[in-house]
Image: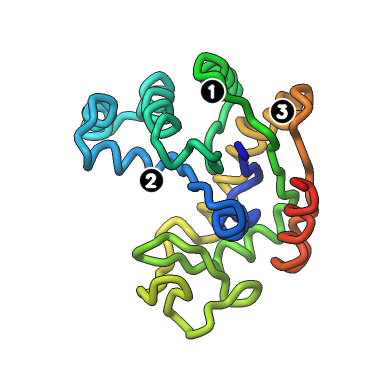
């Protein structure tokens, strides 16, 4: 099953991705993660991306698409995958669509988690992320079993440096301007499913699984 998780930063994509990984045994593909992995593995695309990053520049879409192409071709994606955090703009969505057509694959569903901005600010400032496996928790809505310790790998939980109110508001503005228009793009493709992301985590998971069955 080829999936994409869509929604504003703090909508709960990382949390729900963990449930999808467990249920369908497919990998989560986060742009940041695969970018770091490509650089660590010294792939051609990874080295190209590193040049831009070393110069303090944004990695161009063409390079990101090249890295995603390499990742989607990996053996663990044969049963499917979960795209998370990409695409962020309409040109990226169009480039991804063409890439997938070239690879003979397509998206089964794009799951959009709908959460009002005012709730997102509270969510993100209370977020805690695993320093090792990247699992996401929240001090109120999705606390770890042991405070400060990841449920999955027992590593320490941390607060991301950009998880503060001012940064969150700025990120939300960028999301509404650049990324929200993709809702129409994927709706027109007939793959968009919009869910109420304000529900309890378990209820959102149930709604998500129901939308995929």
Residue drawn 52% across the image and 47% down it? 26
* The image quarter in which residue 138 lies: bottom right
Q: Residue at x 27, y 34 (%)?
A: 53
- According to the picture, the residue beneath numbered tag 3 turns out to be 186
Q: Residue at x 51, y 52 (%)?
A: 167
Residue designated by label 2 = 33
Q: Are marks 2 and 3 in contact (CB under 8 Å)?
A: no
For residue 118, side relative to residue 39 (left or right): right
**In the picture shown, does residue 76 fall above or below 116?**
above
Q: Earlier in the sequence, mark 2 or mark 1?
A: 2
Relative height, residue 182 to residue 161 (above, below):
above
Q: Is residue 204 left or right of residue 94?
A: right
Q: Nearer the viewer, residue 18 or 130?
A: 18
Q: Residue at x 79, y 56 (%)?
A: 207
Q: Quadrant of residue 161?
A: bottom left
In what element is the residue under mark 2? helix
Disc 3, SS: helix
Q: Which residue is mark 1?
A: 96
């Amino acid at each position: 099953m080829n999936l994409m998780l869509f929604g504003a930063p703090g909508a709960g994509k990382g949390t729900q991705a963990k449930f999808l990984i467990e249920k369908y045994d497919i990998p989560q593909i986060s742009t940041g993660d695969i970018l770091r992995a490509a650089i660590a593995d010294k792939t051609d695309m990874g080295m190209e991306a590193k040049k831009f990053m070393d110069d303090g520049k944004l990695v161009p879409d063409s390079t990101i698409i090249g890295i995603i192409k390499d990742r989607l071709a990996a053996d663990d994606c044969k049963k499917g995958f979960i795209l998370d955090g990409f695409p962020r703009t309409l040109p990226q969505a169009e480039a991804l669509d063409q890439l997938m057509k070239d690879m003979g694959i397509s998206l089964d569903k794009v799951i959009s988690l709908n959460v009002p901005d005012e709730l997102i600010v509270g969510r993100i400032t209370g977020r805690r992320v695993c320093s090792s496996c990247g699992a996401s928790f929240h001090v109120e809505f999705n606390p770890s079993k042991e405070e400060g310790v990841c449920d999955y790998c027992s590593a320490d939980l941390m607060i991301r440096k950009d998880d503060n109110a001012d940064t969150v508001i700025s990120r939300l503005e960028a999301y509404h301007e650049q990324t929200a228009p993709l809702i129409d793009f994927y709706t027109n493709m007939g793959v968009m499913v919009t869910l109420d992301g304000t529900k309890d985590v378990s209820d959102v998971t149930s709604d998500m699984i129901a939308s995929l069955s």
